[in-house]
Image (cartoon, rainbow, N blue to C red):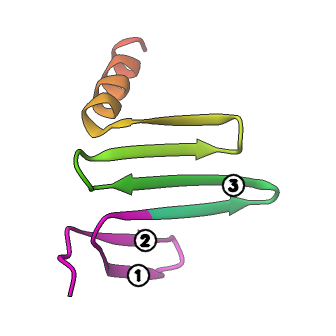
Amino acid sequence: MSEIRMTGEIRTDYDCESTGMPAERWGEAVFKIGDEEIVMEVSVEKDIIVAIMAGEDAVWKGTLKGLKQMLQEAIKAR
């Protein structure tokens, strides 16, 4: 049996919850709003890699450290 390296959770405002979904290497959450799709994928193979996709043309992919830096810079720019 493979090693569980992360677990996933999804919660909504309808008090729906799915927790403890095990993953060895990657997991993703997909949200569909009409014709739009927002996807967040997390990979834990070597480094922690995060990919955020809003449609096909708006994609960011990098390390967790890079994501934190980008968010901190966005907060400082406010």
- Position of residue 34 in the picture relative to residue 18 (left or right): right
Residue at image coords 20%, 68%: 5
Give residue 8's position: percent from left, percent from top. Answer: 34, 70
Residue at image coords 39%, 45%: 50
Specify the quadrant that holds the C terminus.
top left
Q: Secondary structure at mark 3?
A: strand
Q: Which residue is mark 2?
A: 10
Q: Which residue is mark 1?
A: 18
Give residue 57's position: percent from left, percent from top. Answer: 71, 35
Considering only order in the chain, which callout, 1 or 3, is on the residue closer to the N terminus?
Answer: 1
Callout 1 amino acid: Ser
Task: Give the magenta part as a residue range.
Answer: 1-27
Considering only order in the chain, which callout, 2 or 1, is on the residue closer to the N terminus?
Answer: 2
Tell me the quarter of the picture where residue 20 sits: bottom left
Residue 46, relative to residue 14: is it above or below?
above
Specify the quadrant that holds the N terminus.
bottom left
